[in-house]
Image: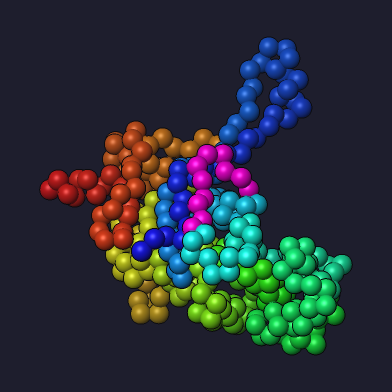
Amino acid sequence: MMPILKVENLSKDFVKSLDLVAKGLNKIGQNYKEEIVHAVDSVNFSIFKGEIVGVVGESGCGKSTLGRMFAGILQPTEGRVEFDTGQVKNKEIPDALLTQMIFQDPFSSLNPRKRVIDIITEAPLYHKLITKSEKRAFAAEMLQRVGLDPDTLERYPHQFSGGQRQRVGIARALAVSPEFLVCDESIAALDVSIQAQIINLFVELKDKYDLTYLFISHDIGVIEHISDRVIVMYLGRIVETAPIKTFVKQPNHPYTQALLEGVPRLEVGKRQYEPISGEIPSPLSPPTGCHFHPRCKSATARCEREKPALREIAPAHFSACHLNDETQSL
C-alpha cells in the first residue's frame, strides 16, 4: 500500500537574532553570533490513508512545528512533505486545501468580528467551491456535520462555549473537503467531558469521510485512545514510532518508556509516579549524540558522542537507540 503522505529529511530551523546590546558590542570588537534552533531535525516517515497518527513528546520537542509544516503554515528549511494526489477523492480541490489544521485554542483561531456563516464559507467562496447563493445551505450542512444547530449561523464566536467553538473550527476545516487534518492539541483547552465529545467526533468524521489525521497531543491517554500509530519526538528528532499496541505494551526507547511510566493507570493501584529526571536541554545548544543521553539512566559513552539512527527493530516498529545494537550483539 502506498502512503498518502511522505516526509523526507524534513527540517525546520529558527534563527534567534541578536538584540541591540549584542549588535552594539559587536561594533566594538565582540563576536556575538546569531543562534539557530533546530526545531525539527531531519525527520522521515510516511502516513497511510485512513490512519490516525499520534505525535507525543514534551513541550518544545517540535510537534507543533511539524504540524505547521504539514499544513503549509511554515516552510521547511530542508526536506519536503509529499502528498500523493493520486489517492485524492475530489480532484477539483486545489492541492493547497488538501491539508487543514485545527488549532488548540478555539477562540483565538476564530475571527471574533465574523459570524459563523462567514467563517465557514470564507475559503469555499474564495476558491469558488460554492457560489454565494449556496452559502447559507452549505454552512448549515457543515454545522450539522459537527453536531451544531444550523440556527446558530448568525452568531459570533463569543456566543458559543469552548466545545462549540472547536466544533465551528472543525466545520471550517471540513468546508474545503480536505483529505488530511492536522489536529494540534485540539482538545487541550477544553473541559474533560467536552474532550471526550470532540474525540468521538473526530473518530466519527474519519470513518464517515475517509479522513487521515496527524493528532498532536501531550496527553498520552488521549493518544492511546484515538491513534493507530504513534510518533515520539524529543528535541526535534523522532526517537520512536510504533503501532499503538506496541507503543503501550513494548516501548523501546528509554524516553518513550519514561513518558509511559508517568501515565497514571487504574490497574496499578497506589504506585508511585516519577517524572523524567533532569530538565529538558536548551534547543539552542542540544546535547551531542543522542539528545536524551543526559537524562537517560542507561546511557553509555557512545550515546554521548554518536547520533543513533532510526531503524526498524520489529515489523512497523522503529527506534533510535544504541542499546538495540548492544542487545542484538549478545
User: Is residue 80 found inside the magenta-colored segment of the image?
Assistant: yes
Query: For residue 145, which quarter of the picture?
Result: bottom right
Q: Which residues are magenta?
A: 74-84
User: Is residue 81 found inside the magenta-colored segment of the image?
Assistant: yes
Q: Position of residue 186 (x, y in %)?
A: 61, 68
Q: Quadrant of the N terminus?
A: bottom left
Left or right, 8 with reference to 302: right
Q: Residue furthest top?
A: 29
Does residue 251 appear in this view?
yes
Left or right, 124 with reference to 265: right
Q: Is residue 24 above or below residue 268?
A: above
Does residue 218 appear in this view?
no
Query: For residue 134, which quarter of the picture?
Result: bottom right
Q: Nearer the viewer, residue 318 or 58?
A: 318
Q: Residue furthest right?
A: 113
Query: For residue 31, which quarter of the picture?
Result: top right
Left or right, 14 with reference to 244: right
- Which residue is at 51% across, 46% downward? 80
Q: Residue furthest left?
A: 330
Q: Position of residue 286 (x, y in %)?
A: 48, 38
Q: Is residue 159 above or below residue 15?
A: below
Left or right, 240 with reference to 40: left
Q: Nearer the viewer, residue 200 or 30?
A: 200
- Which residue is at 70% across, 83% downward? 141
- Which residue is at 45% across, 54% downward? 6
Q: Position of residue 125 (x, y in %)?
A: 77, 67
Q: How is the image coloured?
A: rainbow
- Which residue is at 26% across, 61% downward? 315
